[in-house]
Image (cartoon, grey):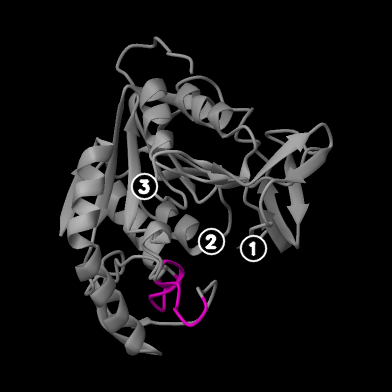
Amino acid sequence: MQHSFTSHADYKEFFSAYWPTIASIDRWAESNEPGYPGYCAPCQRFVELRVERNADFGEATNLRETLSCPCGLSNRTRLLLTVLSQNARSGERVALFEHGSALAKRLQSDYRVSTSAYLGPSARSGEKCKHNGQSLVHQDMCKTSYDNDSFDVVIHNDCLEHIPDYLCAIEECQRILAPGGHMICTFPFFGQNRATKVRARHDGDRIINLLPPEVHGDPMHPNGILAFYNFGWDIIDQIRSVFGNCSLELIVDPLLGFLSNNCPAENMNMPPVVLVAKKRLTTERKSL
């Protein structure tokens, strides 16, 4: 099942109607630990989709971060690749704000990819660095070293919630995209809620936690990284104000391993969604 959403009312109506069905499919998948027969679209083969404990919700397994193919691609990353294939052509220029991942390796086989990672405020965007034995390029999503209109596609995968000024990062993605280019991304999204929940904020050099700290795992940072936001529907409106065209793509398919995060609390459940924003064909930018 695939559906595209552009309004909060449509999203809430759909979610209210289908959440019980989605939740029942999630429970079925969870009951098949350590895995069940499925299909990896990027690999184009039938595989066992692994069901593994990770950033869970009590006794409930977080399916968004598992249902992994042996190739290393999880539910979330395969979903992103599927939506990418619907909006991009092989050989296009792609900026990916991650490095060394299974997603990065898969993209490099089909696209002209520039990968990067964020290594902290002391590094300069565009600087080549060594990190844990890897050679990589540092980029700050709020101020990259890329020229205007450099890419056909910009991809970021659960990054925005960790950026205090995420609106600046959104505008930077718009700047480096060519007219007609796409930003394709994921982030923890609680679309049943209209407003984004602010969990923490910067005060000079200090971080002030407004809610109990929520730390997400990250391969570049062994101690994890702080989430500043739990995004509601308002981020969709904010992205639309920058890009002009924005939709939320939902795909539910147990065979492909596209399921929700399996959180039993309805207001914290995250269906399998990817955001797609298309830059205006003119070079005019609309500021937030």
Residue shown at 82% from the left, 31% from the top: 204
Q: Are marks 1 and 3 in contact (CB under 8 Å)?
A: no
Observer-nearest of 242 and 116: 242
Instruction: Please state if 165 lies on the left or on the right of 182 as rendered.
Output: right
Residue 191 tag number: 3
Q: Residue at x 21, y 74 (%)?
A: 255
Question: Could you tell me residue 253's position as x and y percent?
Answer: 21, 67
Residue wearing tag 1: 219
**Which residue is depicted at the point 54% across and 29% down?**
167
Amino acid type of the residue tagged 3 in the rendering: Gly
> In the rendered structure, which segment of residues is drawn in magenta?
58-72
Q: Identify the mark at residue 101; answer none if there is no mark.
A: 2
Q: Is residue 251 left or right of residue 215?
A: left
Q: Secondary structure at mark 1?
A: loop
Q: Secondary structure at mark 3?
A: loop
Q: CA distance from mark 2 to mark 1?
A: 9 Å
Dot placed on the residue nearer the N-terminal end, 3 or 2: 2
